[in-house]
Image (cartoon, helix red, strand yellow):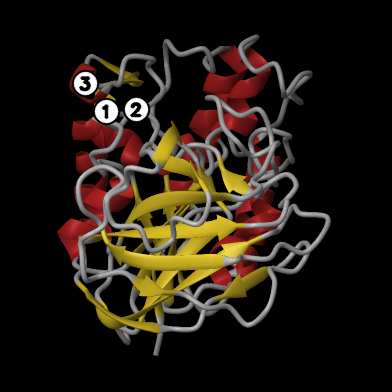
Amino acid sequence: MFTTAWTASPQLPGEGFTPNWSRQGFWRQSVRQVVRLSAGGGRVRVRLSNAYGGSAVRVAGASVGRTAAGAAVEPGSVRRLTFPGEIPARGHLVSDAVELAVAAGESVTVTLYFEAVTGPATFHAQAFTTSCRGEGDLSEDVTGEGFDAATESWYFLAAVETDSGRADGIALFGDSVTDGFGSTVGADRRWSDALAVRTGRPVLNAGIGGNLLLNDSAWYGEKGVHRLGRDVLDHPGVDTLVVLLGLNDIGFSETDEQPTYKPAPVVEADEIVAGYRELIRQARGLRVVGATLLPFGGSDHWGEHAAKVSHEVNEWIRCAGEYDAVVDLHRVLADPEDPDRLHPSYDFGDHLHPNDLGYQVMAEALSLAL
């Protein structure tokens, strides 16, 4: 039985937060991507997504191996990946499984070679780790010397699965806080990473920076009520869903700093609650945990209306009894002197996102709730 050991939610090719290659795609190039697994096993396979592609994409060469320093791969660990066809337009494709012993917490390197023009590439904008590109087929190269360009996004790669046989995976479903904004780049310090270490269970990160519960966005992905099936429910081995989403729906109308999402609608608490109920309905059969929205006073998302709605939403999460369990992240991360603000020790600096320590505290609180 295969279990998803790592995942990234696909996004529409776009300008994104940092320079990336999604709009130009790839031609006669290899792209090398490093991911950290949360479940081990003896066999590995990868899932590629072309969710936003208008035509099929052919992978001319592919490999997986244990990560070494930088773009290098551990000699002797490279396994050639094969696929049963092309990645269909607006679809996904899973590779054949290969023998490769991996452990939870270990990183693997996936290399994809595209000989023909891919067109714009389905991607995940904020990887908070480095992906590399090089000319020609470098899928079996171990030195990494041919990779001469880098970004902090993932391309086509949607999941890595292992034959761990685990069926107790935890999916974290959210926005930039779940995605890991504010964590140390390249250090695997997201709250999903901390949770995997603390619980020993497979953890899927289904966060997208800027994502909304109720509305689509060019930069910030499809709305949560539409993407849950693809980004969580379709992955094998998940039995728990954690919902931490809705803050951008509430806060974007307060800020002028979101040029791709203007004018942002002003939402009320009952609209957010209706979105949560829809996620709970779709996730029937899973244990669904509701997470209260983090304090965000002093941030660019804060204002009189956002304060009112966020308080109402958090009280519903705590008291309605519609989730199977609740983790009160607002309370554990709040500044005792001003509960509407993040504790200074946990604040990345924008009063909206936690730092590495804050993400660790979130993981600790969730592990207790589980």
364 with respect to 27 (left or right): left
Decide: is 24 above or below 11. above
Residue flagged by tag 3: what amino acid is it? Pro
Badge number at residue 355: 1
Between discs 2 and 1, the one toward the N terminus? 2
Residue flagged by tag 2: what amino acid is it? Gly
Between discs 1 and 3, the one toward the N terminus? 3
Q: Are marks 2 and 1 in contact (CB under 8 Å)?
A: yes
Between discs 3 and 2, the one toward the N terminus? 2
Q: Mark 3 vs mark 2: give the one in front.
A: 2
* Residue beneath disc 2: 182
Q: How many marks?
A: 3
* Residue beneath disc 3: 336
Most foreground residue, 56 or 186: 56
Q: Position of residue 142 (x, y in %)?
A: 29, 57
Badge number at residue 367: none
Decide: is 304 above or below 80. above
Q: CA distance from mark 3 to mark 2?
A: 22 Å
Look at 48% across and 43% down and name the residue there.
134
Q: Mark 1 vs mark 3: give the one in front.
A: 1
Q: Position of residue 211 (x, y in %)?
A: 60, 39
Most foreground residue, 362 or 148: 148
Circle 1: is it few (<14), some (14-19), or many (20+) Cα within 10 Å?
many
Which SS class for mark 2? Answer: loop
Query: Where, quadrant-wise, is the C terminus in this rendering?
Result: bottom left
